[in-house]
């Protein structure tokens, strides 16, 4: 797995996950919709921690800066 996520992309993914958690625990979202947002956020968090997004590799996208 070749890293394909840049720093800005990783930060945005973590913020989306945290936003989904805040919305769920403040009861702005609930039920299936709230859980779905958390699952999507968790996938984004996992890809951020791995520094690799499978969808980006399929589409040939990389947000990582080249040296």
Image (tube, rainbow, N blue to C red):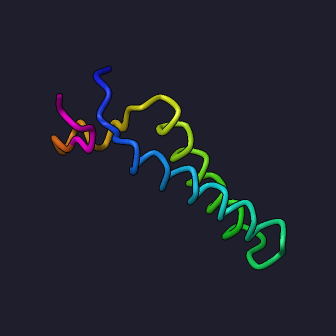
Residue at screen point 45% across, 45% down? 10
Query: Closest to the observer: 42 or 36?
Result: 42
Query: At 19% across and 44% down in the image, what residue appears?
Result: 61
Magenta segment: does it hold 3? Answer: no
Q: Is residue 62 left or right of residue 50?
A: left
Position of residue 50 measured from the top left corner of the image (x, y, whole percent): 47, 28
Residue 63 within the segment the image draws in magenta: yes
Percent coordinates x, y for residue 24 in the rendering: 77, 67
Q: Locate the C terminus by quadrant.
A: top left
Span highlighted in magenta in the image: 62-67
Residue name at image x 56 percent, y 60 percent: 16
The number of discs equals 0
Q: Quadrant of residue 18?
A: bottom right
Q: Is residue 30 left or right of residue 65?
A: right
Q: Residue furthest toward the front?
A: 67
Mainly helix, strand or loop, the magenta region?
A: loop
Rendered view: 9 above or below 50: below
């Amino acid at each position: 797995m070749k890293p394909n996520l840049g720093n800005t992309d990783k930060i945005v993914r973590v913020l989306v996950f945290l936003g989904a958690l805040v919305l769920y625990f403040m009861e702005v979202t609930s039920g299936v919709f709230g859980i779905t947002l958390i699952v999507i956020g968790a996938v984004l968090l996992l890809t951020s921690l791995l520094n690799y997004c499978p969808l980006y590799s399929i589409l040939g996208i990389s947000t990582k800066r080249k040296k």
